[in-house]
Image (tube, rainbow, N blue to C red):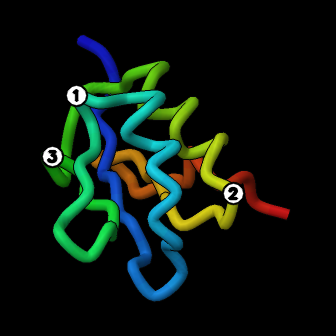
Amino acid sequence: MGDRWHVEVDRTVCIGSGMCVNHAPQGFRLDTARQSHPHEAELDANERVLAAAEGCPVEAISITLVDGGETVFPPEE
């Protein structure tokens, strides 16, 4: 059984670039104010969702493991 991720978008940081939707349309959507939202708060680990988080120009997307809460993205400094 694979990892489950908790995905959040900080809408105070999101600039509505749409890169997340471009990278992972099954993982993210933009609302009418062009703010990103995950389709689901929890999902199976997914390379496209990780690529969307990595490609966000303002790092508004955070991913943590559902079990244990360890950070997947952004990397801890």
- Residue at 44% in and 52% down: 64
- Residue at 38% in and 52% down: 68
Crowding near the residue tagged with mark 2, few <14, some 14–19, many ≥20 C-alpha atoms within 10 Å: some
In the shown orientation, is residue 23 left or right of residue 32?
Answer: right
Q: Residue furthest bottom?
A: 12
Crowding near the residue tagged with mark 3, few <14, some 14–19, many ≥20 C-alpha atoms within 10 Å: some
Q: Is residue 18 above or below residue 11?
A: above
Task: Indicate the quadrant containing the C terminus: top left, top right, bottom left or bottom right.
Answer: bottom right
Going from N to C along the chain, the mark reached first, 2 or 1, is 1
Which picture quadrant has residue 36?
bottom left
Q: CA distance from mark 2 to mark 1?
A: 19 Å
Determine whether the residue tagged by mark 3 lies in a helix, strand or loop.
loop
In the shown orientation, is residue 57 left or right of residue 66?
Answer: right
Crowding near the residue tagged with mark 1, few <14, some 14–19, many ≥20 C-alpha atoms within 10 Å: some
Task: Indicate the quadrant containing the N terminus: top left, top right, bottom left or bottom right.
Answer: top left
Amino acid at circle 2: Pro
In the shown orientation, is residue 74 left or right of residue 45?
Answer: right
Determine whether the residue tagged by mark 1 lies in a helix, strand or loop.
loop
Tell which tag, 3 or 2, sits nearer the viewer. Answer: 2
Query: Residue 15's spot in the image, x, y percent?
Result: 52, 72
Whether pointer 3 and pointer 1 mark residues with C-beta atoms closer than 8 Å, the reply is yes
Determine whether the residue tagged by mark 2 lies in a helix, strand or loop.
loop
Q: Which residue is mark 3?
A: 39
Q: Which mark is residue 57?
A: 2
- Residue at 37% in and 39% down: 21
Going from N to C along the chain, the mark reached first, 3 or 1, is 1
Q: Which mark is residue 40?
A: none
Amino acid at circle 1: Gln
Query: Residue 35's spot in the image, x, y percent?
Result: 33, 70
Query: Residue 22's spot in the image, x, y percent?
Result: 44, 32
Q: Which residue is mark 1?
A: 26
